[in-house]
Image (cartoon, helix red, strand yellow):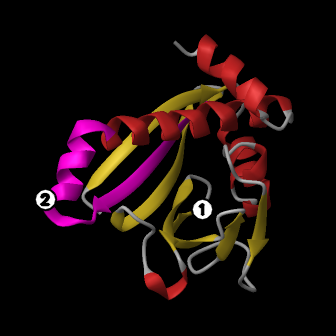
Amino acid sequence: MENEAAYTVHLDMPREQVWEKLRDFTLAPNYVPGITGVEITTENKEGVGASRTVLPKKMDETVIEWNDGYGFVLRLHNGEKGAPAPFKEAGFRYKIEDDGERTKFTAGLLYTMGMGWFGRLIERMFLGKIFVIVVRDIAISLKHFYETNEPVTPAILKRLKKSNH
């Protein structure tokens, strides 16, 4: 995947505590805007090959890289059909690093645009900016949920966006 839209936040928790939550694939509805549920679709619940379907969009996410204690990369796909439009390939990186007594968390949308020159044009014109906003919303929501154990609602996300400008 040739492009990445990324956003970094710092969590007031040690990396080991962040990892315990991050590795639990069932927690995503608490911090990923628009996700209402998760179905684990593989026997293994973590590590390369673990897969889930996120609802309501029914998009599949399969682990393609696993760095125990430090993060992973999910391939975003619709079953065997490949990446959702407008992507040729898409993935999501969750990366954590020690930052003193805190943890540096970086969320990243990894992608290759589909639709040839037209896809590259709309990415440059506006989609690239939208991708960064989406990734920022996930990162600030994850930080809030991990630090407070309070699921992020649309109202909470609105408040978090205001305080992050």
At 19% from the left edge and 53% from the top edge, which residue is drawn?
120
Vertical order, 55 against 50 (above or below): above
* Residue 135, visible in the rendered structure: yes
Is residue 105 highlighted in magenta?
yes
Residue under circle 2? 117
Determine which quarter of the picture holds residue 141. Answer: top right
Q: Amino acid at mark 2?
A: Trp
Q: Which residue is mark 1?
A: 68
Visible residue check, residue 20: no
Tell me how far mark 2 sits from mark 1, CA to CA. 38 Å
Q: Earlier in the sequence, mark 2 or mark 1?
A: 1
Residue at image location 30% in from the left, 37% down from the top: 126
Q: Is residue 16 left or right of residue 67?
A: right
Tag 1: residue type?
A: Asp
In this picture, residue 71 sits left or right of residue 143: left
Residue 98, image x, y percentages: 56, 36
Q: Which residues are magenta?
A: 103-126
